[in-house]
Image (spheres, rainbow, N blue to C red):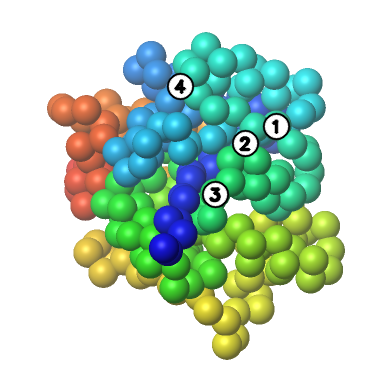
Amino acid sequence: MNHEIKTGFIILCRYNSTRLPGKILLEIYGKPVLQYIVERLAKVISIQDIVIATSSDPSDDPIHNFCRGKKYNCFRGSLNNVALRFLNCAKEYQFDFAARINGDNLFVDIETTKKMHQIALTGKYDFISNVKNRTFPKGMSIEFLRASYFEQIIKEFPTDEYFEHVTLYLYHNDTGKNYCYFYNDICPDAGGFQLAIDDKSDFELASKIIGKFKKNHTEYGLIEIYNIIKHL
């Protein structure tokens, strides 16, 4: 009998981000950024398979406490070695494939995530990513990694920079690899647009976009959000 592939979503986040401290728990219309992300991912996968992976540093206690209050899974690991934190989280939850979602990706696209999740479930690839060549907006990045593959490739990382940026080494060394790059052909004009919440102006833009929503935020995907931005 074939082993059923177990997939999970790992949201990597820290509380003390340099440019916008505490951004992961900042509220937009009464709801923290982190909750928006979880609710969007829960349209793709069971909430039991979504994990918030933060650090064991006391500065990240607010994230841990928030997760406890919401009954979200929370994993705590290395502060600076984010790649190891991601890997250890995937192993702890026994995910065969783990999707890396950044804590600043408030508008992670549900339909794109569903399609990429289906590709991961085929088990054909070691790495599936929509980041290459930035055809999607920043803030809609999704990367699926086969956990056993990542455990091997992490041994090749030459410098701390690669451990901090998790998947950077894979893009720098992708020739002849069993990778699948997923490109945005439904709304190419949105490619590379800044939707990740990096600083105060990004947060203000996100608040403006959500302020235009007439339905639940999970009803809005890439095209709808792009059309809102055009008319702001």
Give the amino acid type for the residue marked by disc 4 in the picture: Pro
The residue depicted at 46 percent of the width and 59 percent of the height is 3
Foreground: disc 2 or disc 3? 3
| Horizontal side of residue 204 vs 190, given as left or right | right
Residue 95 bears which disc, if any?
3
**Residue 165: image location, x then y, percent:** 68, 55
Answer with left or right where residue 59 lies relative to residue 147: right
Residue type at the position of mark 1 = Arg
The image quadrant of residue 161 is bottom right
Q: Residue at x 74, y 50 (%)?
A: 84
Q: Nearer the viewer, residue 6 or 23?
A: 6
Q: Which mark is residue 32?
A: 4
> Cα distance, mark 2 to mark 1?
6 Å
On the picture, is 192 further left or further right than 86?
A: left
Q: Are marks 2 and 1 in contact (CB under 8 Å)?
A: yes
Disc 4 to disc 2: CB gap under 8 Å = no
Q: Which disc, if any, is residue 53?
A: 2
Q: Could you say which quadrant of the image residue 208 lies in?
A: top left
Judging by the rendered image, the residue that carries numbered circle 1 is: 76
- Give the answer, above or below, for where 119 lies relative to 58: below
